[in-house]
Amino acid sequence: MLITRRLEFDAGHRIPNHASQCRHLHGHRYALEITLYGEIIRTEGAAEQGMVMDFSDVKRIAKEVLVDRWDHAFLVYQGDRAVVEFLALLPDHKTVVLPMVPTAENLADVAFRILDAAYQDTYGNQLRLQQVRLYETPNNWADAVRQEAAHTGMEPPC
């Protein structure tokens, strides 16, 4: 069974070498869709009976490990030295320095890796992160999807 929880947050970024407008400092209302796979819990009397995972737990974990950290922050590439140094001059500025350019694709990949470590099989129902979809705008998004080694010859992202 697959379940999905959507969360939204606001953040700024820039793509330093972009050929158009995205090279400028700007922000987005991001949406994050977290899709988990697991068996439906059948334990009689359990609080999660009939669920893969309580949606409120999906939200709580995502907020703790990712969303609260990125919400209203400026997501900046560590190689974008001038911007990193400028943001460091702003008192109490919420800045997240990343090892890669903060494109939708890279942010979805980073989010997958962070969230994959956070969602564990706590219910004994084979719970695992299956996909992260990160919307940069309502019309543009990137999907980071678990790749099964048996099907692709590749190791899954971790």
Image (cartoon, helix red, strand yellow):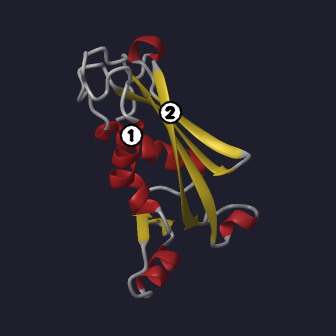
Amino acid type for the residue under numbered disc 1:
Val
Left/right placement of residue 148 relative to residue 16 reads left
Evaluate whether residue 54 shows in this view.
yes
- What is the crowding at mark 2: few (fewer than 14 residues within 10 Å), some, or many (at least 20)? some
Q: Secondary structure at mark 2?
A: strand
Evaluate whether residue 98 shows in this view.
no
Q: Residue at x 25, y 16 (%)?
A: 43
Image coordinates for residue 119, horizontal then vertical, percent: 32, 36
Quadrant location, the C terminus? top left
Left/right placement of residue 35 relative to residue 60 reads right
Image coordinates for residue 100, horizontal then vertical, percent: 47, 55
Q: Secondary structure at mark 1?
A: helix
Q: Which residue is mark 2?
A: 4
Q: Residue at x 67, y 72 (%)?
A: 24
Q: Residue at x 39, y 61 (%)?
A: 69
Image coordinates for residue 134, horizontal then vertical, percent: 57, 45
Toward the viewer: 146 or 9?
A: 9
Amino acid type for the residue under numbered disc 2:
Thr
Pointers 1 and 2 in contact (CB under 8 A)? Answer: no
Q: In the figure, residue 47 lies in which quadrant?
A: top left
Q: Which residue is mark 1?
A: 58
Toward the viewer: 142 or 36?
A: 36
- In the image, residue 40 sits, relative to residue 100, either above or below, namely above
- In the image, residue 120 sits, relative to residue 85, either above or below, namely above
Toward the viewer: 116 or 126?
A: 126
Q: Residue farthest to the front? A: 45
- In the image, residue 154 sits, relative to residue 19, either above or below, namely above
Image coordinates for residue 98, horizontal then vertical, percent: 43, 60
Q: In the figure, residue 122 lies in which quadrant?
A: top left
Label 1, label 2: how far apart the Cα atoms are: 9 Å
